[in-house]
């Protein structure tokens, strides 16, 4: 895995003439769906954009030079958080075997479990709790892209509310971050074969106890 992480890089210029095969996109979608989340919360949605018109519209929501990257990539993944609600907690509890076993063991009914979720979510900061899980799924997608040799660029430089409007997200869903996917342009300046990967030293960032 170290080799994949060394070789991956953020694609800053995409080749707009090349499209990723649907099988690879489908596999990445599954990697997103299978991402772990705290208490199996899954308070998210993935919007997959391949339509050229839609990508052109979304490019307007890119800050600075992110616009052309959105326009030229093969696919844009928009990672979205879902607002937490009692109805969502109920769905999570009903579909998660681990939580049902926990309820049985602790002699808890679903009302108690929902109350636990509710107060725990308040403690974790409802919005930020969901946002953190979305970023975790972004990490899973980035590692998957590295392993699958797919060019990717995570993007925080986006106008989230504008993206919500363009893709037509309703009240309970909010854009958090985007991931552009595709083939690097041959004039890609950040290709590590042309640019040394810059990371702090092990001594700087690792503490082994
Ligand atoms: C959460 C996140 C948001 C980022 N947002 C942007 C962005 O808006 N535009 C951009 O060009 N690069 C963006 N990047 C890419 C970083 O600049 C890049 O990952 C970093 O410089 C390390 O380079 P590497 O990914 O090529 O190893 C983002 C990266 C992450 C992880």
Image (tube, rainbow, N blue to C red):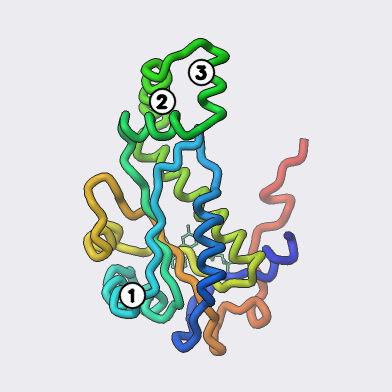
Q: Which is nearer the N-term, disc 2 or disc 3?
A: 3
Disc on res. 117: 2
Q: Which residue is mark 1?
A: 55
Camera-side residue: 121 or 195?
Answer: 121
Counting other residues with Cα less than 10 Å from the Cα at mark 3, is it few (<14), some (14-19), or many (20 or more)? some
Indicate the position of residue 73 as horizontal and vertical percent values. 44, 77
Task: Please report contact status of discs 2 and 3: CB closer than 8 Å, yes or no.
Answer: no
Residue 27 occupies which quadrant of the picture?
bottom right
Is residue 204 shown above or below 125? below
Q: Which residue is mark 3?
A: 103
Judged from the image, the secondary structure of the residue bearing numbered disc 1 is: helix
Q: Is residue 24 left or right of residue 132?
A: right
Judged from the image, the secondary structure of the residue bearing numbered disc 2 is: helix
Task: Please report contact status of discs 3 and 1: CB closer than 8 Å, yes or no.
Answer: no
Q: Is mark 1 within 8 Å of ligand 1?
A: no
Question: Which residue does the image show at 68% across and 51% down from the upper left?
Answer: 204
The total number of labels drawn is 3
Indicate the position of residue 180 as horizontal and vertical percent values. 45, 69
Camera-side residue: 75 or 163?
Answer: 75
């Amino acid at each position: 895995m170290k080799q994949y992480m060394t070789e991956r890089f953020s694609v800053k210029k995409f080749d707009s003439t090349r499209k990723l095969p649907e099988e690879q996109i489908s596999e990445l979608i599954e990697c997103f769906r299978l991402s772990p989340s705290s208490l199996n919360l899954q308070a998210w949605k993935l919007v997959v954009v391949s339509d050229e018109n839609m990508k052109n519209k979304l490019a307007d929501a890119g800050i600075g030079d992110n616009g052309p990257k959105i326009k030229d990539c093969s696919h844009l993944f928009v990672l979205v958080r879902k607002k937490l609600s009692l109805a969502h907690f109920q769905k999570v509890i009903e579909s998660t075997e681990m939580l049902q076993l926990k309820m049985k063991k602790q002699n808890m009914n679903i009302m108690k479990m929902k109350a636990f979720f509710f107060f725990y979510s308040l403690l974790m900061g409802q919005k930020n709790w969901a946002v953190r899980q979305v970023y975790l799924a972004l990490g899973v997608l980035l590692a998957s892209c590295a392993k699958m040799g797919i060019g990717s660029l995570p993007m925080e430089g986006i106008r989230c509310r504008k993206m919500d409007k363009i893709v037509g997200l309703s009240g309970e869903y909010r854009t958090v971050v985007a991931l552009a996917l595709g083939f690097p342009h041959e004039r890609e300046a950040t290709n590590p074969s042309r640019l040394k990967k810059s990371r702090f030293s092990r001594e700087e960032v690792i503490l082994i106890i």
